[in-house]
Image (cartoon, helix red, strand yellow):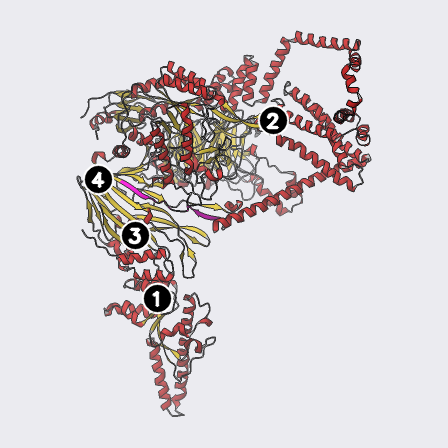
Amino acid sequence: MILSVRVSEILLQGAITVLGQPTYRRILLSLTSILLLAASLSVCAQEVDFQLVASNEYLNLYIDPVTTEVAVEDKATHTFWYSNPQDRFSQRGLNLERLSSQFTITHHFIRSGAPELAEKENYRFSTVYEQYDIQEIENGVRIDYTLVEQWQPRHYVPRMISQERMEALIFSEDPEVRAEQESVLLNYYHLIMLAPLGDRKPLEIAGFNHERVFGEYDLVVLNKDYQERERQLEAMKAQVAQMAEDAPERADLESQITKLESQLNKEKTDIIKRLVENLVESRQDIEKSDFVTFQDVAQLVGNPTYLLQKVPQFTLNTIYNVLAETDYTPIECGEDHVMNNLDPLLPNLQIFHIPLEYVLDGPELLVRIPVKDVKYPVDVEDVVGEKHTFPLLTIRVLEYFGAAGKDSEGYMLVPDGSGALINLNNGRLAGAAFNEPVYGPDGAQDQPAEKRRYPEQTVMPVFGIKDNDKALFAVIEEGASFARVRADIAGRINDYNRIFAEFQLLANGRVALSEKASHISFSGSAAIYQQRMYEGDIVIRYFFLTGDDADYIGMADSYRRYLMDKYQLKPLEPAEDVPFFLELVGGIDTIEPILGIARKVIRPLTTFNQAQEILQTLSQQGISNIKLKYLGWLSGGIRHDYPVSVEAEKALGGAKAFQALAEFAKANGHELYPSVGFQSVYLGSKQNGFNSKQDAARGLNNLAARRYEYWLDTFDRAYPVSWVLSPRILGETVDQFLANYRQYGVPGLALLDLAHELNSDFNNDVRKLVDREQALNTITEQLKKMKSVGYKLMVDYGNSYAVPYADAIVNMPTHGSSYYIVDEEIPFYQIVLHGLVPYAGEPINLAAHGQDSFLKMIETGGYPYFIGSYQESSMVKDTDFAYLYSLHYNDWLELAAEMYQKANAALKGIQNLKIVDHRKLADNVYQTMYENGRTIIVNYNDDAVMVGDWLVGGKDFVVLEGIADAN
Amino acid sequence: MQRRGWLIAIVLPAVIIMSAVVCSSSANAALYPSYVYNYWGMAVPIPDPYVPVRTVSGMDLGVGEFRNAQYIFTAPDNTLYIVDTGNHRIIRTTSDFTLIEVIQQFERDGKIEKFNNPQSVFVTSDGRLFVADTQNERIVAFNPDGSFAYTIDAPQVDIREMLSEHFRFRPKRIAIDPVNRLYVTVEGVIDGIMHMSLEGEFRGFMGAPRVTRSPWEYFWYQIASEEQRARMQLLLPTEFSAMALDDMGFIYATVASSEVETNLFIRKLSPAGSDVLRRNGFFPPMGDLSEGTNSSIVGYSKLIDIIGRDYGMYSALDQLRGRVFTYDYNGNLLYVFGGIGNGIGLFTSPSSLAELDGRLLVLDSRGANCITVFEPTAYAHTIHNAVRYQYDGLFAEATEYWRQVIAMNPNYEPAYSGVAEAYMQQKNYKQAMHYYRLGNNRPGYSRAYAALRFEFVNKNFGTMMTTFLALIFLIYIAKAQSWGPKLRRRYVQSKMARWFARPEVQQNPVYAWLKRTWYALCYARHVMFHPFDGFWDLKHENRGTVTAATILLVLTVLSYVFTTQYTGFLFNIRRVESINIMVEAISIGVPFFLWCVVNWALTTLMDGKGTMKDIYIAAAYSLTPFLLAAVPLTIVSNYITIDEGKLFNLAYSIPVIWTFALLFLGTGLTHDYSFGKIMFTTAATVVGIGFACFVGLLFFDVLDRMLRFVQEVYREITLRL
């Protein structure tokens, strides 16, 4: 079908030219060609008129060509999802404009030397001016938006306009309307023209050179009342001329004539002055009235023209109100200015071009922004030739898609840690809105210390909203690495609960120019930006869920199927016993004085031989299937050397002992995962050719990024710990590591940071710049590479891009960050991943509540995880590793054995199965159900609860075995 | 999707919680870092002692949001009073947060009266409620049945003289001790806590914060005009920010002001008004030790509330960083938790702290406007048990818990002392010393060591005595048989001596140089004991050489390093790990050379006869007493106790004084100065050194600023272009 395309290609081309060739005349020309319909401002009141643009067997996609909002219909259930709330028209003003927008951009502009943030919604800055172009594409539709500065009243009001054009463009043909218009406009405009002076004497005006400005001509005032009075004057003069010299009335009449004449002259003087002043005000090249010449007013010769009086701002609005009713736009206004030798009003510099695509893909909707077609003004010139750049910082996509009103029931799924729910309209306005970066903070960007304490980061690029019996679930498919998921409840800025993704197109920050700058506000800092934008696409995939599926289980299931399809993931093989995750700490570095010289020495916490002993002891306790992550085995301990050379730490026994351990593990059916961190290069350890100038990631200030320790009490920076490796170097580093690691013949590898940290390299040199999405791709390439060589990989934390390549995940988040706005924290990620990869949460012996941590493990289908050392815990005292308290394996050995037996009893046999249900039964009582019907009910309360016929003890759980298969 | 809705349908309706306690924990990781300070004043991580389990807002109670709520109070009957200041009401709930009543108004003589910004309440053990009705300038007392009893208004005239004319009776906190004494802190009153009878009769002030004035301030105060004095006075005294009774009737009081010395932030006042708080921890109880510099929050802790807890423990709430500090009866910091931020367990502007059923409650007056409930973890339970037994004097039981504490958290140093205590009682002094050392407990270590040494001496008295006597006997024999002269004689006759005596050896320049240096070094002993003669000879008889002087200097530096590193644990208050030989060398070398140079510069102007070389040699030779004493004394320091430390310090100061005396004297003698002139040049040199340091610092400072300026300009250019 053919869409009503209201803006022609050519007109749009004009706008694009502006971006390319920034001279103001061109801008003017192109702007002239953009058709602006002021009438569309009143679109708010219009009915939404959806037209079908694409359809497949599952969905219909509709678009309203006037408001550019879209709707998706599920064909099976005839349920609709709207990009903008359909009942939004009860709202007013800015709120309504926001609710009517499909996206919002934020950009910087410079005000008095400092960058300031501006927001532009597409509705207010593009749609109302009809500056968009709708095209049909395969299975969908593409809309190209051009956002401009918003016109203000002063842009509509011409300072001078010829009578002819006034008649043609402004005055209505309808006499009634015209009378109304005249009653306003003629109050504020003088009608003037130039006529030959002839032999009349020009008016003497102090400081005004008639000869230079008007030459042979004289100004004629055509105002109606003025002319009337002039005629009156003529009449009186004629009367006087006819009168006798000594007529009694003569003196009286003459005084009247003088009075009227001086009055008229004064008015004319004022008008002339106004004309000159007007030129001085609006022309850049005329600095004072002496510079005005005849050329500047030549167009007035024989051409009656309206001249705007000096009017205050509110009057300008009055005039604007009249003009806004007509077809007269700033474009025509600009033309009038040019015709009258005035500078056009400031040309519109802030022009942004944003394309948005909606594509149906099976039962899902893809929303795409091809970032290569996104344009923002770079070095555009203004009237005086000054260059301006308006860096495009972020774009919020479909902010109100599926937004739920204040009467809706349901929740929003936010990807904080393992997942969390914000109930719709929960009224928690005291807490801040949810706004978190996907995949955690960027190591190359300076993080304020206080931000670091929120325990969990976002591991998956998903979000969802359940609104009564329908739900919307979104996966950010591309561009997730620079996205933030934002959610807020109704009541803060309007009556809608909304959740959406915001993409940071240009990372930006401020750099202090002087040490003291942080304390001084004036121009002590400069804004800095990433040197270029991300070059790929932004893609969000929306899933539409109805009925029984419209809940977080349904969302998890969608995401699970999505991951399985995309990465060809297979469920695990059924296994005998559940795995036991063990992390052993090898060496730590500490400073010790040797002959009065403080030196770094490695303090062994668990040597390779001792590790064997621990494995044996655990086996004797009945623990089998151990997945051993060995931390700090590389030369240098936990803060190991730059891993391009691979040496087992000598203090732990060296290479031979390490190999012996590997063989022992293999012989006893355990898996060994020696750990390595690639992205941190520790300052105190061997740099092995690492050169921080070239190989470290650069921050926005173009300095090599470092990680710091912070004091726990003041949050002050204590000392630098490591360089952040540039993702550009990562591939090389991994290659060298793998080449040297092969000699040990260990089939496993634990990756400390590849699934946890995602860092850009904001190098000033664009060729060296690695944006965050590129960094993400680099990391997945490394993972693929390691997989292809045959290594089994254990990852920490588990950002979703790494999970398809992982054979085990430890330290996987089991909680959220306890934000005030959140109502419930759910094991969403676990529901997605159970059966695909074995995982463990936090080490139980480091948990504040060990038993609760164990119960959480049971609830989420994870496996026991302990971290230990052979040496006494006090070995870490007074070192930088004091946070590794309670490590001594003897202290937790029995507990671990007991927990393992319990976990084995509960989770054996379902390791490869999917979680099909999870719900809260009562406060602190949760139920998890697996495919085969096994149901586990966990009670976190101190006291026992009755669930059906089952008594669940305090801080305990029960397993209900396969109550007949429903299918 | 395969889901089995029907099972849930069976299970779901039948969930019955067996107990009324709804609020229990799920294993939340806390949002804040929990920590304690170690001996060195560094914050070290500990397992979370308390974790937030829920929040209680006005909405949850069904009474509408709190507004600027200032106080929560646990009554003796285990009910909770919430003073909702901005809403002018008092809310009472049960211990599991079920609303009991909202007290918004009361009937007095048939008229309804309301509160105006009440700040706190107190409930006596017989159930009488007292409300500090702050803006109404009164305390309202209620009967146990909830009816109005009486009010306590501003005390009458006689005390006006003690107070400024602007005195307003705006009670902030109230406390009533077991013998019915009423204590009131009043807004803007800086004279201390008002002590009244329960009927409102004023008895006096107590515990006025001591105003400290430095000599400098005192000086200014003396010469200031009346007006200036008045202004100064306004700044100095401070008011108590919070007050709480312990079960003995003592008052914990906090001051939230930087005007007061940090160690007086928390006080424990006896009924007589004296401060009886024990400050035996590594640091006095004061909240955070440091103000911080770079973070967005800077300053000392602003202790806004305090509660007394069991076994002499007490907890204070810091409004600035939103933290709860808990100390034991000895003033040891037990744990710190909490923080500022947006999340459960973090606050915006916490105002009050209470303990209810073993849980800690923190009230936030802004932000989320709610009470956060914290539940103790296993770690807190263990540490509480340890403190409890220790408080009761049951050290054996305490030790068991201290051991567990160490297993959970090796960073908590007082726990090691607790374990050491047990070893002491078992007379296992070696282990005791080990643990005391881990606990950085020097007095304890000293006691253990003294006992160990006593035991050793006791056990080995016979052997030691025998050895000692044998030695005496040996020396006596040697003397009697004149072994020494005999040996010397034999050496002179030996081949080796003869070989050395040969002229070609004697004339060998290396040998000659070695010999000369050796003699020059040996001469140091003579200089030490006969300075007048010795320093004269050094210069005029050429008895000293630059080489020997340099050797002496290097040896001094080495022995100094040895001293800093190997002084016994009891006397070494430096972190051995952080010692750096270069820094130590510089700390001796720089003053030494400054002395030489400044002295030379000065004396050339005052017709001193000494050259630079002379000064250098004289100064280096003066170091001998320190050099000779340092190593033996350092070794000795490992074998003595703290009690003997005074003697040790004396022994240490003798060579130091001696060295300085030699230095002053020797340098002067080099210049052939009279005694008076020596004194003068010494003083002048010291001043000169100070001046040189000042100029040096100035120079480096200017240089540093210049470099930084250039750097900034460069940075600005690169960034702006």
Direction from residue A422 to residue A274 in the image, left or right: right
**Sooner in the amino-acid sequence: mark 2 or mark 3:** 3
| Identity of the residue furthest to the front in this view | B504
Residue A854: x %, y % from top left? 35, 23
Please report the bounds of the magenta region as a residue range. A524-541
Circle 1 or circle 3, nearest the eye: 3
Badge 1 element: loop
- Cβ atoms under marks 2 and 1 closer than 8 Å: no
Please give the label number shown on residue A596.
2
The verdict on a common chain for dots 2 and 3 is: yes
- Residue A952 image position (x, y, % from top left): 29, 21
Give the residue type at disc 1: Pro
Secondary element at tag 2: loop
Mark with earlier residue (4, 2): 4
Q: Across the whole image, how many numbered discs are drawn on residues?
A: 4
**Badge 3: how crowded within 10 Å, few (<14), some, or many (20+)?**
many
Residue B364 appears in the picture as rendered: no
Q: For the residues tagged 2 and 1, is the chain the same?
A: yes
Specify the label residue A145 is tagged with: 3
**Closer to the camera, A635 or B273?**
A635
Q: Amino acid at mark 2?
A: Gly
On-image quarter of the C terminus of chain A: top left
